[in-house]
């Protein structure tokens, strides 16, 4: 797919990308310094969108505050933002604007309420006055922890069996119903028990597709049902939301494309955190401590 971008603040006049899913097949830059633009074009070929953004974003050219490589990164960020809007049907439409070539002409996506497409349940909290219900081996996932691979609290089998807490599996869709992160959605990273502030969804064929779709529309849901950012969602609200579903093969293609981007983002974020830790340790070795400097 061809994507054109007009750079700002640099000598180049236009960037023309050929992108297949999440992979940049080619880049042609019109204008600018030939050696620089040809080198950048060769550098990005065959790489993923997030990999190129990580490599090139923030590179300056003199005192301009940007550069042709930086503009390539900005172009891809803009492309990625629009990708979600094009891979799912817009409001009032039954087809997305973009479809993968092998699914062209495969018919309209079918409308289905989340409550009919997914198994849904929420959990509960074991009695906090009973010590025998806590300190076990079962991770107890609360709404602020739906994106995490560990939990602060653990409950026992007795706590699970004597309360409304429910077990979820790794890969289940978790939606925060209450609290500051109401409306946030995640794919569970662990097996564990959930409380009443979390709704679990299990789709009949592809959890990842529903996760990405819900992530795409969550701002619309929050703005419609949580006035002024205050309030709670409920299972009844989520149950009634209609999504459009293609055939399972196309669901998988869409989900795999977006999951690959998520994986790259996560990988780059981990690298940034590792570099921050390395820098912190390096600075501690390069500079004397306050106590040493003020002896």
Image: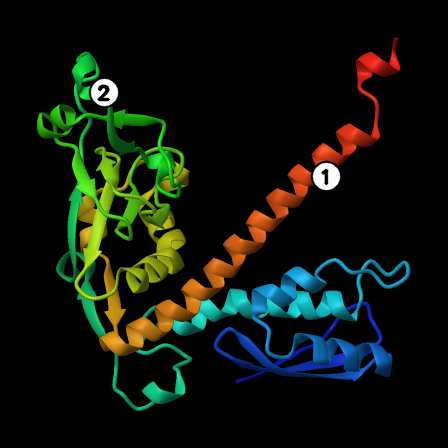
**Which of the numbered marks, if any, corresponds to residue 163?**
none
Q: Is residue 194 above or below residue 218?
A: above
Residue placed farthest to the left in the image? 162
Q: Earlier in the sequence, mark 2 or mark 1?
A: 2
Q: Would residue 272 appear left or right of 155 to someone viewing this image?
A: right
Q: Residue 263 at x, y = what percent?
A: 47, 59
Answer whether residue 258 is visible to the viewer in this image: yes
Q: Residue 236 at x, y = what percent?
A: 17, 47
Quarter of the image with the C terminus in it: top right
Q: Residue at x 9, y 29 (%)?
A: 161
Which class describes the residues within 10 Å of circle 2: few (<14), some (14-19), or many (20+)? many
Q: Is residue 153 above or below residue 274?
A: above
Q: Residue at x 39, y 82 (%)?
A: 99
Residue 123's image quarter?
Answer: top left
Q: Is residue 219 above or below residue 136?
A: below
Residue placed farthest to the front in the image? 285
Q: How far, Cα to Cα, is label 2 from label 1? A: 39 Å
Q: Residue 79 at x, y = what percent?
A: 56, 70
Residue 268's image quarter?
Answer: bottom right
- List the residue tagged with mark 1: 279
How many numbered dots are placed on residues in this image? 2
Q: Residue at x 78, y 82 (%)?
A: 38
Residue 132's image quarter?
Answer: top left
As rendered, which of 244 and 143 lies closer to the eye?
A: 143
As rendered, which of 286 and 272 lies closer to the eye?
A: 286
As rendered, which of 104 and 241 lies closer to the eye?
A: 104
Residue placed farthest to the bottom in the image? 105
Q: Residue at x 65, y 70 (%)?
A: 75
Q: Is residue 294 above or below residue 49?
A: above
Answer whether residue 90 is visible to the viewer in this image: no
- List the residue tagged with mark 2: 134
């Amino acid at each position: 797919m061809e994507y054109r971008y007009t750079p700002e603040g640099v000598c180049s006049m236009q960037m023309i990308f050929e992108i297949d899913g999440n992979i940049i097949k080619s880049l042609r830059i019109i204008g600018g310094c030939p050696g620089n633009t040809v080198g950048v074009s060769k550098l990005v070929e065959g790489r993923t969108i997030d990999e190129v953004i990580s490599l090139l974003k923030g590179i300056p050219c003199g005192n301009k505050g940007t550069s042709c490589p930086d503009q390539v990164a900005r172009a891809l960020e803009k492309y990625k933002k629009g990708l979600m809007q094009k891979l799912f049907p817009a409001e009032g439409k039954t087809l997305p604007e973009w479809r993968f070539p092998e699914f062209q002409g495969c018919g309209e996506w079918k409308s289905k309420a989340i409550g009919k497409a997914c198994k849904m349940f929420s959990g509960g909290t074991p009695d906090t006055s009973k010590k025998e219900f806590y300190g076990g081996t079962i991770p107890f996932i609360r709404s602020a922890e739906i994106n995490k691979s560990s939990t602060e609290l653990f409950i026992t089998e007795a706590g699970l069996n004597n309360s409304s807490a429910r077990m979820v599996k790794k890969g289940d869709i978790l939606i925060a119903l209450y609290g500051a992160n109401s409306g946030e959605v995640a794919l569970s990273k662990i097996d564990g028990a959930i409380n009443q502030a979390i709704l679990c969804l299990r789709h009949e064929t592809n959890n990842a597709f529903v996760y990405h779709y819900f992530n795409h529309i969550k701002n619309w849901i929050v703005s419609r049902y949580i006035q002024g950012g205050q309030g709670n969602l409920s299972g009844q609200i989520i149950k009634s939301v209609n999504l459009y579903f293609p055939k399972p093969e196309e669901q998988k293609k869409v989900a795999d494309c977006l999951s690959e981007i998520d994986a790259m983002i996560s990988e780059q974020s981990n690298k940034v955190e590792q570099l921050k830790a390395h820098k912190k340790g390096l600075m501690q070795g390069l500079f004397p401590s306050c106590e040493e400097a003020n002896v």
